[in-house]
Image (cartoon, rainbow, N blue to C red):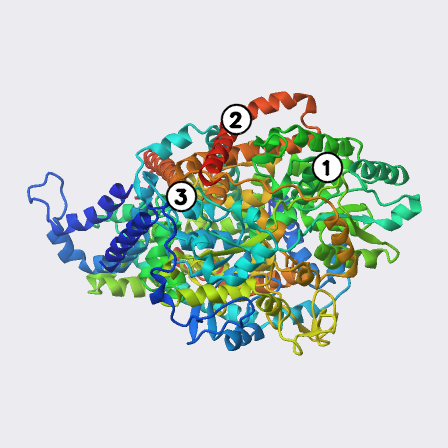
């Protein structure tokens, strides 16, 4: 891994020092011209680049232990080459494939439900005419974001216990109480809906910020054209928040594999492993028992590769279809 | 001509909207009120499960008890200091880099973006990071918390997207007037970016406020801990079976103490929030030039 | 650049350590190179000697910060310790909740403090191969008190369970004189009286009692258990399983020693394990045991008990007094809750798990060997953790200040000091305000010292339990480095599969008639290969080390 990591960062600085040959087919300034013209801009990037080099790229060298045998307390770079041993290990591990599938499903469902909801809520809040009420709703909807995961998990279990409020409602409408936390079939629903509870309000912040930047004149013009509320929303509001939405969508797709570790850990139990166990929790159990850092590094690399491919694809699609791109 | 605002459909929508949002408020508030009620209740009342929305066996003693622990206040002060310093540095670095990345004609821009995006997916493991921080001599100092997390790529890209949405005309005009890049960033761009800056401050501040992992990794003295580590120790208890099962001195911390600590940790963010929020709602009069 | 240098240095050190750890089978070269490491050490340190360094020394310590008594730098414990031993401890504070991750991280990064306490037997194995920790068994000659207690209490076989494939052990465990049975069931005796029943002595009698309770209170589950998260049936399966001959729950290990067959068997596939599950399944099927017992958070189980919705729950001495009785008394002043002796199972009156008299203990960083004060450090550890005086000091503090010792040698907290409810309402607390009875320093020791903190009912409980027979200690079966890497990859999925099906069988989600199919599934996940490996390791060790 270190290969990609180190090649990527210095290649940029190298390019900058070596001015490309003048007779380049592509139009645009040479590096010398660019540096002379934009040196002030480049100077702003120095500190951040330093940050990335030291705190992000340097530690990546340690990923080499995915291919070397690491002994806790031994060398950081592992003791001896193990080749693809650890990769083969997880590819032939049936549990790995189960947790892999679970990660994909949970990640996919979260994306499907938790990405659009903040937009809807932001639009609803934006339509409120009573300023006080608006402020109140906003403030309240951010609260869950501040609660510790441990607290949230405790609340979920209370709500869903056999004597809990949800089951009281189920009984009231004549149903039989469900042991929600013990049914593998319910886990995904519980995970996704509580995820919505936690994130939707907080997610509106960026959209509300974007909404404030939409020019009132555009609404004015739309009204002149006789557009109703719905059409104003459709033709002015939504296009106004599109860059934000697309950026967030691409980022969310990239973070797809990073299903909330702590949350699953706190909510699952052996009965729900078939649907709830994800890569990170499986690694945790492997890790606590065995300190098998090499195995973890190998799986971590795979996770990273998948994330990278996903984000590249999403970005490509978005650039082709709506013209917005991360880079 | 009747303005659209007064149609019956719209009024119906407003009513419905209010109902939906009230529903959102109730669902969201319930657990929070529950915690506050617990924090004001008697321990045994919590244990017997009778505390819901109203405190039972009302008592302020738990607050007094937590507040009388000097470690709590030392850690609390640490959190405030860490959060302020870290947020400040993070905002400066993120703004600089995001601004650079937002210049479409800048040569090497793509590579610069990649430098950042790549780190979203690939990272060093725990041990290399730990060795880095300790060999830089940052252990047991505020910099171990501030520096390694100074740029969140997510926030960076959000900010970059925002800068790209700003009208280019103002900056071009300023440049023609002879203003340099730093001047343009400080005097033209930033004043237009209050909304996103406010969002960033909030994002970073909340993240730093709630973070515990860096502190847990790099701090070895309890008077350097932020309050989250204090809180986590209270709430999480032992994580592994062996430590739950066989600790001779295994005693759990009372549920009401946990609630009080949660409430006290939540409080500042909830109190500060309305002031930051003002920027989103009314701060920006960007409309005039938006293209 | 500095960074790279440091890395190179680390690699060099790593290689050196690896080389050093290679010549394993050579007899220990004790003493030969220790002469340069005696700074501060006492010349004639022996049993009964008060350790005091001849020059001030200080040692780093990984400190497990308990949330109930968070560390304070002004504890009397620290200052008095320095006064008595001329030694200062420099703690690296780690929250209890994440102690194990930080420990493995610090050892992994080569940055661990010299003294690493609160390590449970078995947890040290993954650090052995890299040579990061000290094979303490080579240096026991520096520890007279430790050796004395091992000999006096006949703990040799127990210590053997810690030996690694090189025949040494790497952990200084806490040593108990007697077996200490912590966990059992708590039961509402007022309900028993109401029904005219006696306290059950066997699991079958417990079944009968639960049925009688159910008959009287048909709308509720008479038993609703706690300690289900994160290990389902953590305490219950441990207690019940060991009485059936196959400990589960917290004590679950894939391999269990079968003394009759003189072999290890795969626990989750043992007939005894099946019997234990069958028993619990019957309780659930007859609605005597709350099915949520295995997944609900502890607070919920306590709520059910306190509100009178259940009458039986797992307990230890502390939770009984601290967590169950107060809310129960508030809700129902006439309720009486008692910790009953562990019911007897098919194995007859045996002591339940723990299998050994070893406690969690101390690992020592290999770096300590480079210190001039190495010998002094070993003497210090020996005094504080293993001498009678050190143990009494760590537990009770100073006579006349934090404790009073009466004529018969019985300890009591001083009148203004509160400890485990002995002086409720006293202004100061032995643990919180003075730092004594701290889990990092105070554990193990003589039965008398252990029981000095027990209430009368707990002493009676221990007496009953100690009258029962102890099972033989299981023999050592250390795996080689390569075997262990393979074993860890098998162990987690196997354990997961057992846990998951344990729950299914108990709750009736899977019929016990499918047991054979389940055992086949385990075999498909290499349970046989695993047990063969363990048994081979056992035979190998027996041959090599007698």
Q: Which mark is residue C291?
A: 1
Marks 2 and 1, how far apart at CA: 32 Å
From the image, tell me which residue sits under label 3. A293
- Say left or right for A23 vs C34: left
Q: Is residue B218 above or below residue C418?
A: above
The residue lying at 38 percent from left, 71 percent from top is: C39
Q: Residue A232: percent from the left, percent from the top?
A: 48, 43
From the image, tell me which residue sits under label 2. C528
Dot 2 falls on a residue whose secondary structure is helix
The residue lying at 27 percent from left, 60 percent from top is: A47
Instruction: Give residue C320's quadrant in the image.
Output: bottom right
Dot 1 falls on a residue whose secondary structure is helix
Query: Does residue C57 appear anywhere in the picture?
Result: yes
Query: Does residue B225 appear anywhere in the picture?
Result: no
Question: Disc 3 or disc 1, which is closer to the eye?
Answer: 3
Q: Give the class, few, some or many, for how many residues have Cα within 10 Å of label 2's Cα (few <14, many ≥20).
A: some
First in residue order: circle 2 vs circle 1: 1
- Say left or right for B87 vs C151: left
The verdict on a common chain for dots 2 and 3 is no
Question: Disc 2 or disc 1, which is closer to the eye?
Answer: 2
Image mark 1: chain: C
Q: Is residue B91 above or below residue C121?
A: below
Q: Residue C202: percent from the left, percent from the top?
A: 80, 39
């Amino acid at each position: 891994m270190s290969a990609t990591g180190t090649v990527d960062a210095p290649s940029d600085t190298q390019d900058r020092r070596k001015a490309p040959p003048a007779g380049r087919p592509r139009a645009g300034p040479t590096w010398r011209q660019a540096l002379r013209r934009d040196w002030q801009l480049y100077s702003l990037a120095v500190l951040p680049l330093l940050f990335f080099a030291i705190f992000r790229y340097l530690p990546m060298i340690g990923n080499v232990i995915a291919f070397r045998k690491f002994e806790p307390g031994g060398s950081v770079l592992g003791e001896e080459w193990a080749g693809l041993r650890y990769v083969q290990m997880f590819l032939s591990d049936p549990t790995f494939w189960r947790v892999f599938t679970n990660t994909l499903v949970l990640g996919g469902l979260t994306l499907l439900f938790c990405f659009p909801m903040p937009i809807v809520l932001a639009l609803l809040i934006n339509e409120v005419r009573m300023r006080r009420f608006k402020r109140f709703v906003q403030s309240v909807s951010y609260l869950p974001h501040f609660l510790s995961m441990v607290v949230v998990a405790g609340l979920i279990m209370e709500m869903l216990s056999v004597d809990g409020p949800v089951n009281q409602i189920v009984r009231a409408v004549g149903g039989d109480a469900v042991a929600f936390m013990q049914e593998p079939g319910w886990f995904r629903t519980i995970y996704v809906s509580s995820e919505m509870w936690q994130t939707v309000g907080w997610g509106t912040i960026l959209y509300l910020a974007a909404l404030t930047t939409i020019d009132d004149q555009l609404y004015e013009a739309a009204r002149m054209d006789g557009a109703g509320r719905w059409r104003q929303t459709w033709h002015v509001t939504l296009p106004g928040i599109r860059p934000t939405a697309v950026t967030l969508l691409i980022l969310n797709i990239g973070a797809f594999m990073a299903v909330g570790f702590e949350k699953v850990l706190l909510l699952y139990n052996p009965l729900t492993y078939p649907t709830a166990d994800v890569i990170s929790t499986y690694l945790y159990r492997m890790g606590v028992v065995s300190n098998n850092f090499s195995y973890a590094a190998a799986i971590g690399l795979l996770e990273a590769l998948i994330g990278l491919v996903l984000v590249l694809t999403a970005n490509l699609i978005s650039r082709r279809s709506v013209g917005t791109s991360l880079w | 001509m009747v303005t659209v605002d007064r149609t019956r459909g719209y009024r119906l929508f407003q009513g419905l909207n209010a109902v939906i949002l009230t529903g959102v408020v109730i669902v969201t508030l319930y657990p929070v009120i529950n915690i506050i009620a617990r924090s004001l209740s008697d321990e045994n009342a919590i244990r017997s499960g009778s505390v819901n929305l109203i405190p039972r066996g009302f008592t302020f003693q738990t607050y007094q008890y937590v507040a009388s622990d000097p470690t709590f206040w030392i850690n609390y002060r640490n959190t405030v200091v860490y959060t302020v310093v870290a947020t400040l540095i993070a905002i400066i670095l993120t703004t600089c880099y995001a601004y650079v990345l937002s210049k479409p004609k800048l040569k090497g821009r793509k590579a610069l973006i990649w430098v950042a995006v790549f780190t979203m997916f690939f990272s060093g493991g725990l041990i290399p990071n730990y060795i880095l921080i300790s060999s830089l001599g940052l252990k047991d100092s505020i910099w171990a918390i501030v520096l390694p997390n100074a740029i969140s790529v997510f926030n960076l890209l959000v900010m970059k997207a925002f800068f790209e949405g700003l009208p280019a005309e103002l900056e071009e005009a300023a440049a023609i007037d002879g203003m340099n890049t730093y001047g343009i960033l400080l005097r033209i761009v930033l004043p237009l970016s209050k909304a996103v800056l406010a969002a960033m401050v909030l994002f970073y501040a909340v993240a730093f406020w709630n973070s515990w992992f860096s502190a847990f990794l790099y701090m070895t003295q309890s008077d350097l801990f932020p309050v989250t580590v204090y809180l986590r120790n209270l709430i999480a208890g032992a994580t592994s079976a062996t430590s739950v099962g066989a600790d001779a001195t295994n005693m759990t911390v009372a549920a009401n103490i946990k609630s009080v600590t949660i409430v006290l940790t939540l409080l500042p963010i909830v109190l500060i929030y309305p002031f930051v929020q003002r920027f989103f709602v009314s701060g920006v009069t960007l409309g005039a030039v938006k293209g | 650049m500095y960074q790279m240098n440091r890395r190179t240095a680390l690699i060099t050190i790593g290689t050196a350590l690896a080389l050093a750890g290679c010549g394993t089978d050579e007899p220990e070269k004790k003493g030969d190179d220790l002469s340069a490491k005696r700074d501060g050490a006492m010349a004639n340190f022996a049993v009964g000697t008060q350790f005091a360094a001849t020059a001030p020394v200080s040692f780093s310590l990984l400190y497990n910060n308990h949330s109930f008594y968070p560390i304070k730098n002004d504890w009397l414990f620290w200052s008095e310790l320095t006064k008595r031993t001329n030694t200062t401890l420099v703690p690296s504070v780690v929250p209890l909740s994440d102690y194990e991750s930080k420990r493995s991280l610090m050892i992994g990064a080569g940055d661990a403090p010299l003294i690493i306490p609160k390590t449970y037997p078995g947890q040290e194995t993954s650090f052995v191969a890299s040579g990061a920790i000290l094979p303490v068994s080579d240096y026991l000659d520096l520890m007279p008190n430790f050796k004395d207690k091992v000999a006096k209490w006949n703990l040799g076989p127990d210590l053997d369970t810690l030996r690694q494939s090189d025949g040494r052990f790497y952990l200084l465990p806490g040593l108990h004189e007697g077996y200490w049975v912590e966990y059992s069931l708590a039961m509402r005796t007022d309900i028993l009286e109401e029904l005219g029943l006696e306290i059950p002595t066997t699991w079958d009698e417990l079944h009968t009692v639960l049925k009688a309770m159910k008959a009287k209170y048909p709308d509720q589950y008479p038993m609703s258990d706690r300690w289900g998260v994160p290990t389902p049936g953590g305490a219950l399966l441990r207690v019940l399983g060991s009485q059936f001959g196959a400990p589960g729950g917290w004590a679950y290990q894939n391999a269990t020693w079968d003394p009759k067959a003189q072999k290890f068997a795969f626990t989750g596939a043992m007939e005894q394990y099946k019997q234990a599950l069958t028993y619990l399944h019957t309780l659930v099927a007859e609605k005597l045991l709350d099915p949520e017992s295995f997944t609900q958070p502890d607070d919920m189980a306590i709520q059910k008990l306190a509100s009178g919705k259940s009458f039986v729950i797992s307990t230890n001495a502390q939770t009984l007094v601290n967590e169950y009785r107060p809310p129960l008394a508030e809700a129902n002043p006439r309720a009486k809750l008692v910790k009953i002796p562990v019911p007897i199972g098919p194995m007859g009156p045996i002591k339940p798990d723990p299998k050994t008299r070893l406690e969690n203990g101390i690992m020592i960083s290999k770096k300590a060997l480079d210190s001039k004060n190495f010998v002094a450090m070993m003497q210090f550890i020996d005094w504080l953790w293993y001498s009678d005086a050190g143990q009494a000091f760590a537990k009770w503090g100073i006579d006349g200040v934090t404790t009073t010792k009466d004529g018969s040698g019985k300890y009591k907290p001083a009148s203004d000091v509160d400890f485990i409810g002995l002086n409720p309402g006293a202004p100061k607390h032995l643990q919180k305000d003075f730092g004594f009875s701290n889990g990092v320093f105070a554990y193990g020791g003589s039965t008398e010292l252990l029981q000095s903190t027990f209430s009368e009912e707990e002493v009676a409980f221990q007496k009953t339990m100690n009258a029962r027979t102890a099972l033989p200690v299981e023999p050592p079966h250390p795996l080689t480095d390569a075997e262990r890497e393979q074993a860890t990859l098998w162990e987690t999925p196997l354990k997961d599969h057992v846990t998951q099906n344990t729950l299914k069988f108990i709750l009736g989600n899977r019929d016990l008639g499918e047991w054979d199919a389940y055992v086949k599934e385990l075999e498909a996940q290499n349970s046989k290969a695993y047990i063969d490996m363990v048994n081979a390791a056992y035979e190998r060790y027996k041959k090599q080390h007698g």
